[in-house]
Image (spheres, rainbow, N blue to C red):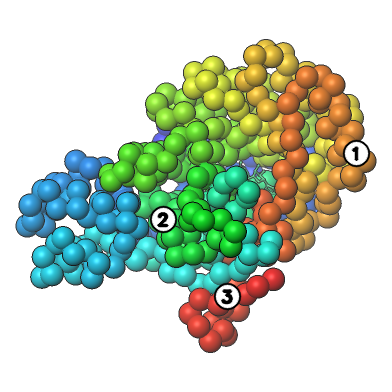
Amino acid sequence: MSVAETPDLPRSEARTPAAPVVPEYVQPPDRSTLPLVFTAPRRGKPPMHWADLDPAARRTAVEAAGHRAYRARQISAHYFEGLRDDPDTWTDLPVAVRGELASTFMPQLLKPVRELTCDDGDTVKSLWQLHDGSLVESVLMRYPDRVTMCVSSQAGCGMACPFCATGQGGLQRNMSTAEIVEQVVDGARKLAHGALKDPDASSTPRVSNVVFMGMGEPLANYKAVVGALRQLTTPKPDGLGMSARGITVSTVGLVPRIKELATEGMPVTLALSLHAPDDELRDELVPVNTRWNVDEVVDAAWEYARITKRRVSIEYILIRDVNDQPERAEQLARVLRRRGTWGWVHVNLIPLNPTPGSRWTASRRSDEDEFVRRLQARGVPVTVRDTRGREIDGACGQLAAGQADIAEASTATTPVARARV
Ligand code: SAH
């Protein structure tokens, strides 16, 4: 269900997404005024895939295709446990049916267009083409203690944040559950095949963390995203068997959806892209603030922490002379502390990553340090995020797959161009 289909949203805006919701006066004259788009354009549905189905639906589908129900578990073990989508490797299934099962249940959803590597080989960005030509990106990152997969949940994004390259490109369509899951499975396969391996480490790394911080607003594609969360957290062999603790859903702050997510029984970490402690500035930086303001969205985040017992992460991009003043740090501390000091929240500061056409830049180091100091002095836990993938436009807010990427990739000699930047 999309956000616009819920009764708690004003229907008029949902029906006419073309009308800008952001009052003109808060927009600087040289920045675009994009509309907020909650309902994704309806495009041809991606083909159904094994990772769209729950275990019961898989058994039914296998039976409907003329096979015994227990085959479903065998197929799941190949896909989720063995990460094998090549039917030739499904040796516990009769040769005669392998190909047919694979073509019915595992159509290729993500066509690799290009891969870029940076950070000494510790970051890999993949550009994918979906069945209808839409382009999305995912980023795999190795850290000393974990491997994080950053996934897209929509092709494009309708939230129109002016500092974000994806937001500036508008929304093409929602991704399906399987299209989201396949990004993680691909990362897991890459690792299994030796990618990102530390030559000194004896064991093969695994995807330990998944962050919904790629293209799109995950909570505007709620049903597919929750479906993907289930596939990721369902124990093997019926799912990828990941811990909900390792999964982070990042949102601009769709309040009804934050509340709903809290009741799903999957205590994933919620990251709220706040970026300003006051409505005047947040209306401009995160246009959806005109729908749910700072107080409403921080209340919802607090409620999420209370219900799930998971500490919420407040994302705060530092933009030079826009939101990085000491008074704003004080105000942010007040906004958070007002809701209690029981460890419900943590602030993650993100140095602004450059995006095309934006006249904003990252904060000065001294202002960043002062911002951190002010928050710490008020007892607010704070970290500064490192900017993985910056050189390959794979960092936060830089994902904006475009036709130029395809053109560039198609001039390469192999279908997947591997560039080392
Ligand atoms: N739509 C979701 C998830 C995608 S963006 C959201 O907004 O939360 C993931 C994070 O990257 C968000 O906190 C987002 O605000 C941040 N981001 C976007 N553009 C950025 C940029 N240019 N530099 C740094 N962070 C950015």
Q: Is residue 195 left or right of residue 392?
A: left
Residue type at numbered disc 2: Val
Left or right side of 196 for 379: right
Examine the rendering and report whether any part of residue 140 can be seen. no
Disc 3 residue type?
Arg
The residue that mark 2 highlights is 185
At horizontal 73% and vertical 26% (from top left) the residue drawn is 381
Front position among marks 3 and 1: 3
Query: Residue 297 placed where, x, y %?
Result: 62, 26
**Callout 2: 10 Å neighbours few (<14), some, many (20+)?**
many
Which structural element holds mark 2?
helix
Q: CA distance from mark 3 to mark 2?
A: 20 Å
Q: Is mark 1 within 8 Å of ligand 1?
A: no
State the CA–CA distance, disc 3 to disc 1: 38 Å
Q: Position of residue 65 (x, y in %)?
A: 11, 57
Mark 1 vs 2, N-terminal side: 2
Instruction: Residue 367: give its label.
Output: 1
- The extreme right residue here reads 366
Residue drawn 42% across and 24% down? 263
Label 3 crowd (10 A; few <14 / some 14-19 / many >=20): some
**Split into 4 quadrants, where in the image is the N terminus?**
top left
Badge 3 is on which residue?
418
Query: Tag 3's secondary structure?
Result: strand
Mark 1 neighbour density, 10 Å: few (under 14) some (14–19) many (20 or more): some
Measure how far apart labels 1 and 2 are at the Cα level: 40 Å
What kind of element bears circle 1?
A: helix
Amino acid type shown at disc 1: Asp
Closer to the camera, 98 or 331? Answer: 98
> Mark 3 vs ligand 1: CB under 8 Å?
no
* Residue 119 seen in this snapshot: yes
